[in-house]
Amino acid sequence: MIAFAASLSTDPRLRRLAGELARFFAVGATATVVHYAILIGLVELAHAALIPATTAGFIGGATTSYTLNRRVTFSHQPQYGRGLAKFFAVSLFGMGLNALIVGGLARLGLPYLMAQVGATGACFFWNFTAARLLVFRAPRPQG
C-alpha cells in the first residue's frame, strides 16, 4: 500500500487517473441523486413498477453523468452529440446490469432502495471504465 501511495505521488499517469476517479465519483454522486429521485418519485408517488422506474432513473442519472463528466472529469471532450450517443450506447449495458441486479435483489426480498444501492455500487466500476476508455478517450495522434 505504501509503494502504491509513493508511486501515486510520482507517476503523473496515476495522479491523473486518481483525479479522474475522484471527479467521476463526485459526478456519480450527483447523478445518483437524480437517479434515486426519479426512482423514488415514480415508485412512491406514481406507483410505477420497479424495473421501469429504475430504468427511467438510470436514464436521468446517465444524462446528468455524461454532461458533468464531459465538463469536469475527463480532459478530452468529444463533440457533445457524438459523445452522448457513445455514452448511451455503452450505458445500455450498464442499464441492463442495473435492472438485473435491482430485480434480482428485490426478488430475494431486499427492499427496493437497498437493491438499488447494491446495483449502484456494482455499476460504478463498469461506468468509469467504459466512460474513460470508450467515450472520453482522446483520439490517438496520427503517424
Image: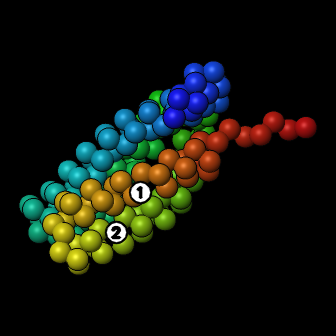
104 relative to 139, above or below: below
Q: Residues within 10 Å of mark 1 (few under 14, many from 20)?
A: some
What kind of element bears circle 2? helix
Spatial distance from mark 1 to mark 2, Cα to Cα? Answer: 9 Å
Image location (x, y in percent) of residue 127: 47, 52
Residue depicted at 21% across the width and 60% down the height: 114
Q: How many marks?
A: 2
For residue 97, say whether it is visible.
Answer: yes
Q: Is residue 93 above or below residue 35?
A: below
Q: Does 42 appear above or below 83?
A: below
Residue 123 got which mark? Answer: 1
Residue at the image position 50 percent from the left and 47 percent from the top = 128
Q: Amino acid at mark 2?
A: Ile
- Looking at the image, the residue that sits furthest to the bottom is 107
- Residue drawn at x 68%, y 38% is 138
Residue 23: % across, % down? 44, 32
| Rendering quarter of residue 107 | bottom left
